[in-house]
Image (cartoon, grey):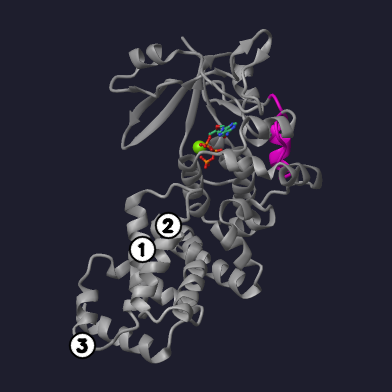
Amino acid sequence: NYDAYIVGGAIRDICFDLKPKDVDIVTNATPYEIKKIFRGSRIIGKRFKLVHIGYGRNIIEVSTFRKNAIMQNGFIKKDEKGKLLRDNLFGSEKDDIQRRDITINSLLYDPNKRIIIDYFDGFKDIKNKKIKVIGDPKKRFIEDPMRIIRIIRISSKLNLQIDKKLSGIMVTNIDLIRDIPSSRLFDEFCKMFTNGHAASCIVMLYNFNVLKILVPRLSDLMRNEKNLDKIKKLLKASDQRFEKKLTISISFVLSSLFWVLIKDEHKALLKKNKLSKIRSIFIAVDNFFSNFKQINIPKRIQYEMKTIWVNQIRLENTRGKKPIKLLNSDMFKISYDFFLLRNQIDEINNDIFLWWADFYKKKS
Ligand code: ATP
Ligand code: MG
């Protein structure tokens, strides 16, 4: 007999009357003990082992209580800056809760006894819609700077207040986020921009100067009210899809997010060189990806973004055989959706828009 609790985002979201995206479970059973109980479960992870239990079509992630890090001569092992180096020891229930990021993520729910265990007054903070870091915020941000971005994501999703003191600490420590590995940032970006609150999230990332560090050129462009407004409108389209429970393509959202930047670069290139519009967009896109190292966008998604962007120029052409070729190409539908979205922000010439609407209706 073991203890097992539902923990983290799932309990938090239920308390906010939202349907949880996934359920995380913590237990005092070790991965091998868990595997013995659940047939068809799988142990995953190298440093810290977790168990995936198949449940219908879903996978439930179960982890053993963790302790924060290794104590060495009475100190937790960190690098010279204070960043956590290892994170792989089994611990107690309290240990596990203590290493979580914010109080509203720290509730444990015991489904057998039907009780909530609340070490850090997380329930009160849920009721008051408050974000509070567990422990000393500065130290927790040094241990793992991703926590700054997580706070932004979670407060934009749940419409929570970040008080002055905490926002001050976030902003003064913002440089730490340069150390986050680019692949981890990509995963976090996926969560941020597909959770139905992409528009408010980008405004927060901009206000907290996160964007200035991750994508400085976009941050500069957002100082212009018109660009800011465009980005918000483009992202709201994805937020509305979320509301309607439709799927959201990460390539589409990222294409929306960086569009003003691509457009700006395209315009500059056209001014500078005597190249065609189509050549220039290829160069603009290639420049963008080769200068963009902070967030590791997988090659397949880069390819899709590139196609969506390049197709915006191809869609300007309504003559000859090219439109029909484009219509029959792989990524036409998603590119055309982006074109329709751009029409809503008045970027499309009305004759071209009407021509495509008619052509599309006839041919499909
Ligand atoms: P979502 O609804 O997007 O899944 P979440 O809060 O559940 O949000 P997860 O990444 O699934 O986010 O993490 C599950 C739990 O693990 C969190 O609720 C939090 O308690 C803890 N956690 C996740 N990342 C960190 C971190 N960087 N530092 C401390 N605790 C974390
Ligand atoms: Mg979760």
Residue 156 location in percent, x, y? Answer: 62, 52
Is 98 rendered above or below residue 211?
above
Q: Residue at x 48, y 43 (%)?
A: 182
Mark found first going from the N terminus, 2 or 1: 2
Magenta stretch: give its range: 119-134
Residue 310 location in percent, x, y? Answer: 35, 70
Frontmost of labels 3 and 2 is 2
Would you say 136 lies left or right of 93 here?
Answer: right
Q: Which three-letter amino acid code belongs to the residue tagged 3?
A: Gly
Secondary element under disc 2, as helix, strand or loop, is helix
Q: Is residue 86 visible?
A: yes
Q: Residue at x 64, y 57 (%)?
A: 206
Residue 188: image tag: none
Q: Residue at x 35, y 80 (%)?
A: 276
Secondary element under disc 1, as helix, strand or loop, is helix
Q: Are marks 2 and 1 in contact (CB under 8 Å)?
A: yes
Q: Residue furthest bottom?
A: 351
Predominant secondary structure in magenta? loop
Is 137 rendered above or below residue 240?
above
- Judging by the rendered image, the residue that carries numbered circle 2 is 289
- Cα distance between the residues tagged 3 and 2: 32 Å
Q: Is residue 237 visible?
A: no
Name which quarter of the figure residue 363 lies in: bottom left
- Judging by the rendered image, the residue that carries numbered circle 3 is 320
Residue 204 sits inside the magenta stretch: no
Q: Residue furthest right?
A: 165
